[in-house]
Image (cartoon, rainbow, N blue to C red):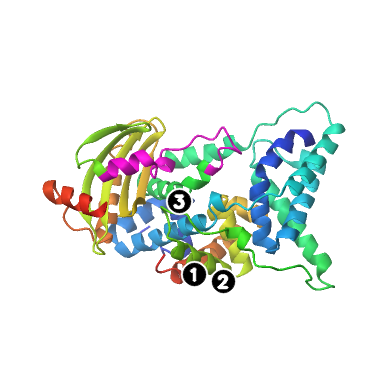
Amino acid sequence: MSQLHLSDEILMAFADGELDEPVASAVEQAMLADPTVTRRIADFLRSRRLTRSAFSRERLPEVSPELRAAVQAQIDAFAGTDDPPAKPETPVGVHRQRRDTWFSLNGALAASVAALAIASASYFVGQHQALPTRPASLVAQLDDAPVQDALSTVASGKDVTLPLGRMRVISTYRLANGSLCREFRLQGSAGAAAAVACRNGDWNVTFAMAGPEGDAAYTPSSGGDLVTAYLQDAGAGEPLVDAAETKALAESSR
Amino acid sequence: MPAAIGQDLVALLPRLRRFALVLCRSPSLADDLVQGACERALANAESWTPGTRFDAWMFRILRNHWIDHLRRLKAEGMTEDVTTHRQLMGDPGEGPLLSKLALTEVQRAIEQLPHEQREVLVLVCVEDLAYREAAEVLGVPLGTVMSRLARARKRLVELTVAA
């Protein structure tokens, strides 16, 4: 696999969690060895996030009452000729199963999938009404207000208990571009996640990986390396500690 | 069976309409397409396999309906009000993820993509379809989905350096 040609399609599939083993592992290795690979994958994650933002739930087009009524009339018309309706199994289960499969994968693949899940956070929240049985995954909540608050206030190394689980901020970095970023972990009933968030007004999660429920991914073996690789690629220097961290957090919140 | 999918259909209307707007860019035509697709779906409800993705099935019906519409229209030429589809994206204001300026830039970039790239981009990145599911909706091979999608996303990144 050392000769694997990392085409755009392969890296995109990796970013989208669509790559099977052993190619996924090969990409994972390449990612650790070559920052440009990480950057290309990050670009694919970014394009997905951007697209989703442009089409976010707030911008779902209005369905006019006329259209809604017309469709309802069609449904009623068909229902009139129908046997007593038996609600079919919704497709939600299938979708969820696919995601669960992803989440059981290790390391970088899970990382990329999780990063996507972040990109899709607004979507999943947005779909709650339509698909009420879909659970909000942990990564979908990494942008939530309690996490935001904790990122702004909690010192590195400290654990806090949030509604969605236990959170620990690992460290704080100043990137080459000046932005302030924090690496943190989250362990909740919906699973475990390791992530990096950078402050730009709010905290935006820029990188994350998730694991299944339990402690498996709370301290991901290869996962930690990937976060480190990501931070190095982003130009993070030494972590800010103690007073330097406090000062940086205070300044960034102004 | 038709009644059984009715509820799912109603819940899906906003996303159907959004995809219809991606396809045709005309709010009034989008409504017609959605309504026509719903009718087809209800009439063929038994062809949906419970346990598979209902949304993907509907997107395929909607898109096929759109293609039929285009074929019928071909002789006459496009007469629809291809107005601005600002409604598709709405007013920017996402907040935490993107600034207004950046979002406008992204929207413009997506607009500039070729149609076949835009539809696959939306199906995969917005509607969360797997590549294979998108391939089924679009009626193209998996490899085509991947190459179109990769090109769209690389272009998007190039066009939105600042976003």
Query: Could you say which disc has been placed on residue A13 in the image?
Result: none
User: Mark 1 = which residue?
Assistant: B155
Magenta-colored span: A126-152
**Does residue B36 lie above or below A127 as drawn?**
below
B126 or B86, nearer to the observer? B86
**Does residue A151 lie above or below B152 as drawn?**
above
* Residue A163 horizontal side relative to residue A53, left or right: left
Within 10 angstroms of label 2, few (less than 14), some, or many (20 or more) residues? some
**Does residue B17 lie above or below A221 as drawn?**
below
CB atoms of marks 2 and 1 within 8 Å: yes
Amino acid type at circle 2 is Gln
Are marks 3 and 2 in one subunit? Answer: no
**Residue A39 appears at what percent x and percent y?**
35, 62
Helix, strand or loop at mark 3: helix
User: Mark 2 = which residue?
Assistant: B112
* Residue A132 horizontal side relative to residue A219, left or right: right
Q: Nearer the viewer, mark 3 or mark 1?
A: 3
B90 or A38, nearer to the observer? B90
Residue drawn at x 39%, y 63% is A40
Q: Kindly tell me whether residue B151 is visible in this rendering.
A: yes
Marks 3/2: CA distance? 22 Å
Residue drawn at x 71%, y 29% is A87
Amino acid type at circle 1 is Arg
Mark 2 and mark 1 lie on one chain; the one further toward the N terminus is 2
CB atoms of marks 3 and 2 within 8 Å: no
A214 or B12, nearer to the observer? B12
Helix, strand or loop at mark 1: helix
Could you tell me which quadrant the N terminus of chain B lies in?
top right
